[in-house]
Image (tube, rainbow, N blue to C red):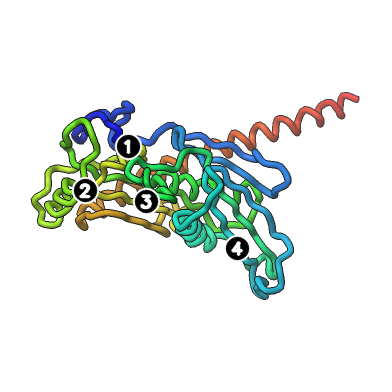
Amino acid sequence: MTSMPHTLAPGNLRADQRLPNQLRPLSTSFGTLGRVDGSASFAFGDVQVLCSVTGPAEVRIRDELVDRAAVEVSVRSLPGVSGTTQKSLSALLSSTLSPLLLTTHHPRSLIQLVSQTLSSPALPTSQSSTFPALPISEKAATVNAGTLACMDAALGMRGVVYAVGVAVLPAHLPDAILPGEEEAERMQEDEKEGQGEEVVFLVDPTAMEEARALSTHVFAFSFGAGVGGDEGTVVGAESLGVFSEEQYLHSLDLVRTAVQEIRDFVRSEVEQRVREGAERDQVPADAKRRK
């Protein structure tokens, strides 16, 4: 088993020198793929996901909807083999993003989203699984990349959706190895009975942090007029493990703040892209006037 440094108490730095509520460096790119109508990538540090959008396009008669466009979502893993985890993530992406698309503007057509992870999906606790569990940060990055790809494809949208994950860990775990099954069960039983040790909440956890978590949570928030405004509203949630109501609500509050940071980051990236496009268009216009 792989060892990991001691999990630090709240307020202290994590192993990668981040605060407990701090995101990894964010990065995005637009229009990275050809022969599609839109594409974008989103990354939390080295956790990167690429998403493409094709459509509105012709749809097969059996999938045709007379009053709106059909939305098809596919998630692919890094090795190229998809299992139940990818299907579950496809359902999360579809349920959070599809309601924001103005599909009624394109009846009898198809909008296809394809997501591809560009980072290693395996968690340390799932090495023996045929289809390893996906880190929650990868799930969140998939939702974020899907939103950006739809924006790049210029699809009509009611708003945007962004997601972030949180891991709840014991504040004091012994160094060396990941807790065994008996130890993990004991910690979870203590949490049920309210006798557990102090816990720490880590926003955007690494795979190693997530492997030692008592519970993990990923929340998606939508923003836009009528779908959350500037504060955002929850449109998707997925939780695993044993946790109290108080821990769940605190995780929700942490994500609410983090997704607003992502929203502001994406807004600045889009504004910069628009400015650069306007400058490129201005150069030929000035040259034409001089002629």
Residue neighbourhood size for the residue with mark 4, other residues' Cα within 10 Å, grouped as few (<14), some (14–19), many (≥20) = some
Q: Which residue is mark 3?
A: 218
In the rendered image, residue 119, in percent from the top left (x then y), is placed at 49, 38
| Residue 147 visible in the picture | no
**Front label number (2 vs 3):** 2
Q: Which residue is mark 2?
A: 181
Instruction: Please tell me whether mark 1 sits on a helix, a strand or a loop.
Output: helix
| Disc 1 from disc 2: Cα separation | 16 Å
**Foreground: 291 or 67?**
67
Q: Identify which amino acid the numbered label 2 is placed on.
A: Glu
Query: Mark 2–mark 4 contact, CB under 8 Å?
Result: no
Query: Mark 1–mark 2 contact, CB under 8 Å?
Result: no
**Foreground: 184 or 222?**
184
Write the residue at 49% across / 48% down. 142
Q: Earlier in the sequence, mark 1 or mark 2?
A: 2
Q: Which residue is mark 4?
A: 71
